[in-house]
Amino acid sequence: MDPICSRSFTARRLGVAMLAVAATLALASCDRDLTPQIADGIRQQVAGAPPATVRRDVWDDVGHFYEQRMFAPRWVRDGRVDDARLALRVLLRAPEHGLAAPDYGEPDLSRELSDTRAIEDALAKDPAKSAQLDVRITTAVLALGRDVAVGRRGPATIDPRWKLRREPPDLGGTLSAAADAGELDAWLDRVRPRHPEYAALQKTLADVHAQGGSEATRDDRARRIALNLERWRWLPDDLGARHVLVNLPAFYMAVREQGRPVVEMKVVVGTPERKTPLFSDTMETVVFSPYWNVPDSIAEGETAPAAARDPRFLARNQIEILRRDKDGATIVDPASVDWDDEDAVKALAFRQRPGAHNALGHVKFLFPNQYDVYLHDTPADALFARQGRAFSHGCIRVEKPEALASYLLRDRPEWDAQRIEKAMHQDDEQHVALKDTLPVHIVYFTAWPDGRGGVQLWPDVYGYDAKQAAAAVGGTRRAASAD
């Protein structure tokens, strides 16, 4: 080759190479310039008030997520949206938990990311848009994560006495760690309730979605399972290695060890007008041959009017009248009471003596709580033959009181079956403290895994399914829809 031509060819090659290097440096320079600007945009967004469609607790999770990252973007990086698409896969798993991906803005985000070249070109020119998109994705994923962890709405929306008892995990921290470790697909499984019943209901829900047949039937079963998945999110992860579980719609009680029932029985629960409250507390005491201290509401509405009408009512039902003061209680002669004096009658207390006709039967089981609810025996054994057993004033009547007392006192050798039977039929009340207390959980599940891949369904005795479903329809949230 001619030397001049050779030099010209070499110069052209050198020029092309230099242009390529310059372009690479320019892109790198652009990246270095854009990342701080995106971070500044993210910092400004999360420092402000949450969008109208985003709950305050979710917005706090978003802030925590970015604080750990020094506000660096996570899903829109180097002008690319590959990680953003991975995050959207999390949203698409919402139905596995009885939730709906559109409630978290998934369709809008998917459409926005569908044209890769167009969105990446737009992001490369606009750091503010990158910051906005990154925050929207984080908000959507964390909104779903919080709903999976502790529920879309608290139980107080159904009954003000019903409290949320699960502590939320570190949602922002666990999401960041899962994303950095390439384990986003497993993140929802890490923050969901740990109870095996939750996982079993999830599996049943997936089977229901896959079934053929009537769409209406399928949708109804799926809806009921979803409502019950929500209620598991309100319970603490640790129910106790040993615990008492009372499921009101099933009219069922079990003492469970490591999640397996060791003592089971039917129960009678509160009527729809006098609902048994949903709560957890600790069993502490067995009371043999108990007095029944008549609650004020029953005394005023039933006992006192009956005594006023029938002078023999109190004696026939073994009920005593007490007048309480700072020095204690004094038994009052019914003949001395002016039943027409409402104020005087309201100052009295009533209690039923131990015996065969005592409303509490021969034993009660105390787990002190603000509702004055407890488990107890009953003389009305015939009620246990009924299918629906919502007949009490709020306390829980147990079918097999001897079996429950024997279990609770099994670590007290002196309390054998013979002594328990004797204590249950004496004239004096006797309190026996448990050596080992155990948690009591009063719950409301209308769907329960049957252990064979199916689900048992019970009537919505208190109407909580209906109220919960109505609240969900009325408050659908699009957590990521705000720009």
Image: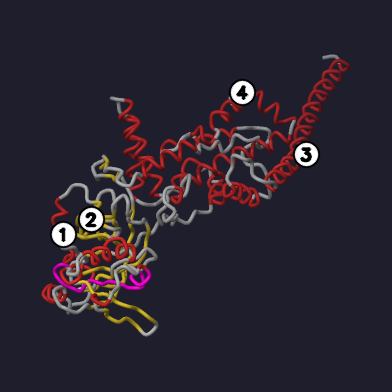
When the figure is inspected, residue 318 is found, relative to residue 93, above or below; the finding is below
Foreground disc of the pair 4, 3 = 4
Residue named by callout 4:
115
- The residue shown at (66%, 23%) is 118
* Badge 3 vs badge 1, beta-carbon distance below 8 Å: no
Foreground disc of the pair 1, 4 = 1
- Amino acid tagged 1: Ala
Task: Determine whether the residue tagged by mark 3 lies in a helix, strand or loop.
Answer: helix
Tell me how the rendering is colored.
secondary structure
Residue 421 occupies which quadrant of the picture? bottom left
Label 3 neighbourhood size at 10 Å, few (<14), some (14-19), many (20+)? few
Q: How far across and how far down the image is residue 279, in percent?
A: 37, 58
Residue named by callout 1:
380
Please state if 44 lies on the left or on the right of 404 as rendered: right
Residue named by callout 2:
268
- Amino acid tagged 4: Asp
Q: Which stretch is magenta? A: 343-357
Image quadrant where one finds the C terminus: top right
Foreground disc of the pair 4, 2 = 2
Residue named by callout 3:
33
* Badge 2 vs badge 1, beta-carbon distance below 8 Å: yes
The answer to which of 90 and 215 lies nearer the viewer is 215
The answer to which of 189 and 198 lies nearer the viewer is 198
In three-dimensional space, the C-alpha distance between marks 4 and 2, rounded to whole angstroms, equals 60 Å
Foreground disc of the pair 3, 1 = 1
